[in-house]
Image (tube, helix red, strand yellow):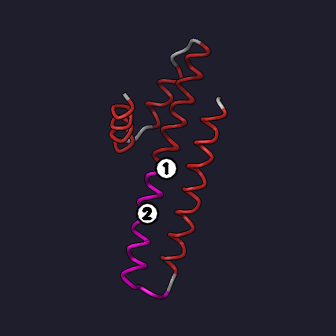
Amino acid sequence: MSLFTNVKLLSCSQVKQGAESMIAKYTSGSGSSSRDKKLHQEAMAMLDDSKRKIEYIRMQQLLLRSKIHGTQSGVWLVIQHLTATSVTWMLKTLIAEA
């Protein structure tokens, strides 16, 4: 895959790891201030978003591989692993990119 795609995937993976660390910190913390709750919610949203982006990038990689190899199997692999939420998010992303 392209270097750009790998960099995007790495970046999203780092965001995911950071969000998971924040969630662990604000979940296990004894203080339950409104600021902590807000940071926890933001971390949950970041985690969800990064998971979707990672899934989207992997879908792009599978589709590209299937085009390179001249098969449609990559498309079906992507479809089998998608959740309804991911499909909605990906469609919005594709429409915004068009």
Q: Which residues are magenta?
A: 30-51
Q: Residue at position x 57%, y 68% from top?
A: 21
| Residue at which label 2 appears | 44
Quadrant into which the C terminus falls:
top left
Q: Is 53 in front, or is 84?
A: 53
Three-letter code, disc 1? Lys
* Residue 79: x %, y % from top left: 43, 30
Residue 55: where, in percent of width, then height?
Answer: 50, 41
Amino acid tagged 2: Met
Q: Nearer the viewer, residue 79 or 60?
A: 60
Q: Nearer the viewer, residue 60 or 2?
A: 2
Task: Measuring from the top left, give residue 93's x and y in whole percent.
Answer: 38, 37
The numbered dot on residue 10 is none
Q: Characterize the local packing of mark 2: few (<14), some (14-19) or many (20 or more) Cα atoms within 10 angstroms.
A: some
Tell me if mark 1 has few (under 14), some (14-19) or many (20+) residues whose alpha carbon lies within 10 angstroms of its own: some
Q: Label 1 belongs to which residue? A: 51
